[in-house]
Image: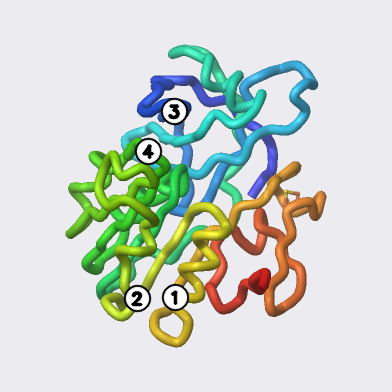
Amino acid sequence: MKETYRKGIIHTNTEISPNIYELVLEGDFHGRPGQFYMLRGWEELDPFLPRPISIADIDSGKIKFLYEVRGRGTHIISKLKKGHSLSLLGPLGNGFDVKVEGKIALITGGIGIAPMLYLAKQLLGEVHIYSGFRNNAYFLDQIRPYVKAVNIATENGSVGHKGFVTDLFDPKDFDLVYACGPIPMLELVINMCKGITPVYVSMENHMACGIGACLGCTIQTIRGMERVCKEGPVFKGEEVVLND
Ligand code: FES
């Protein structure tokens, strides 16, 4: 893959929940579920780093991203309107296995729901999604047509179960688990699945280059330190060395 930035033209950039945006760009983009692009919506040197954002869907000449406004870079991107252009590098990372059969659980926390639409569309098995949010559920209306069951938890109980999404899920019910979300949730899911069900997790870390050059995104695995942007972001649960 040639690692140069290219332009994408904004089709829509919509706030679908407080601080959560759905960005759709026009262009011939490609990638697998779980891969990401580095996005840059500004020309100046400040903020210096582009932002890594997961592919949420690719369909009919458009690519969709879901992102949370967390800092200056995503704040700048959130202000861009239809017709503006963004610079993109990708697709990057390994991504999830698709075309998988059997009974599959997708476990998400917050913005970790981002890759699950594109993934659910390409899985062949019976897919159940378990999504946890702080207070507002989002994006599930788009995923619902591609899954057998939707299970929701919110910390304040405003939608679905009051508590954590892991309260709802039993690994014994599934042949395979995919998870994406905050690290403490992923650690809990890995521990719950240990010895019961294979689990793949999409790990998060700070990223500077996104292409394996800066070593700023490494995590501890059973093979040693590995780069989330290059060997990941998807790892087998048993490969990740958890904090005690
Ligand atoms: Fe630079 Fe991963 S972000 S090596």
Towards the viewer: 232 or 132: 132
In the image, which is nearer the foreground, mark 4 or mark 2?
Answer: 4
Q: CA distance from mark 2 to mark 1?
A: 7 Å
Local crowd at mark 2 within 10 Å, few (<14), some, or many (≥20)? many
Q: Is residue 161 visible?
A: yes
Local crowd at mark 1 within 10 Å, few (<14), some, or many (≥20)? some
Number of the label disc, if any, that sits on residue 135: 4
Q: Residue at x 31, y 55 (%)?
A: 120
Local crowd at mark 3 within 10 Å, few (<14), some, or many (≥20)? many
State the SS at label 2: helix
Quadrant occupied by the C terminus: bottom right
- Name the quadrant containing residue 171: bottom left
State the SS at label 1: helix
First along the sequence among labels 4 and 2: 4
Q: Is residue 26 visible?
A: no
Looking at the picture, which amino acid does disc 3 mark? Answer: Tyr
Q: Are marks 2 and 1 in contact (CB under 8 Å)?
A: yes
In the image, which is nearer the foreground, mark 3 or mark 1?
Answer: 1
